[in-house]
Image: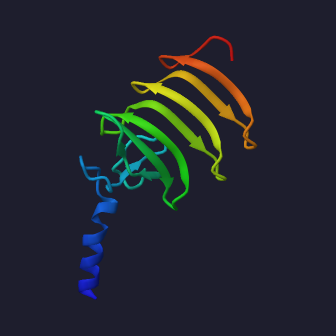
Amino acid sequence: MRLLFIALIIYSQPVFGQFRQGHKDSVVHFNGFFRSEQDPERIQYYGIPKKIKDKLYEVDFYTLDTMLVATGEYKRRNFKRRNGVFVLYNSDGKIIVTANYRNGELNGIYQKYYDNGKLADSGNFSRGAPLGLW
């Protein structure tokens, strides 16, 4: 029994550990605002980061019961600053929001969709503020 417990601890470390450079199977935990989180009481999502450019990482976000809820890009591996496209999904896996970020702020096209996939709202952001007609 003790050997089984030790084996579970050893083999579960990559799942519960933090992301390490070059270790593609490491899991990062996130809070409800999609920022990296280490406090177990605040963890709502997890993701496995993939490096896509020099300091740009893409993460698929899953609920703790493995449902895909979002995909997003981050600048740097601390996963605090969104940078690039973020996509949110409903429980059926359909896109409900696409948004662009630059240095952690909404910047560019923002689109919100109904559950049936039709466009509900669309507009632009500049440095976190709505821009023009919506």
In this orientation, which residue lies closer to the viewer: 32 or 73?
Answer: 73
Is 28 located above or below residue 56 in the figure?
below
Q: Can residue 49 be seen in this view?
A: yes
Residue 27 image point, x, y percent? 35, 54
Q: Can residue 33 be seen in this view?
A: no
Is 95 located above or below residue 38 in the figure?
above
The structure residue drawn at horizontal position 59% and vertical position 26%, both measured from the top left corner, is 110
The number of numbered discs placed on residues in the rendered structure image is 0
Residue 30 image point, x, y percent? 41, 47
Is 75 located above or below residue 107 in the figure?
below
Residue 127 image point, x, y percent? 47, 17
Q: Quadrant of residue 114?
A: top right
Q: Give the left or right position of residue 38, taking residue 96 as reference.
A: left
The structure residue drawn at horizontal position 72% and vertical position 31%, both measured from the top left corner, is 119
Residue 20 image point, x, y percent? 24, 49
Q: In which quarter of the image is residue 87?
A: top right
The structure residue drawn at horizontal position 76% and vertical position 43%, both measured from the top left corner, is 116
Q: Quadrant of the N terminus?
A: bottom left
Q: Quadrant of the C terminus?
A: top right
Is 91 located above or below residue 121 in the figure?
below
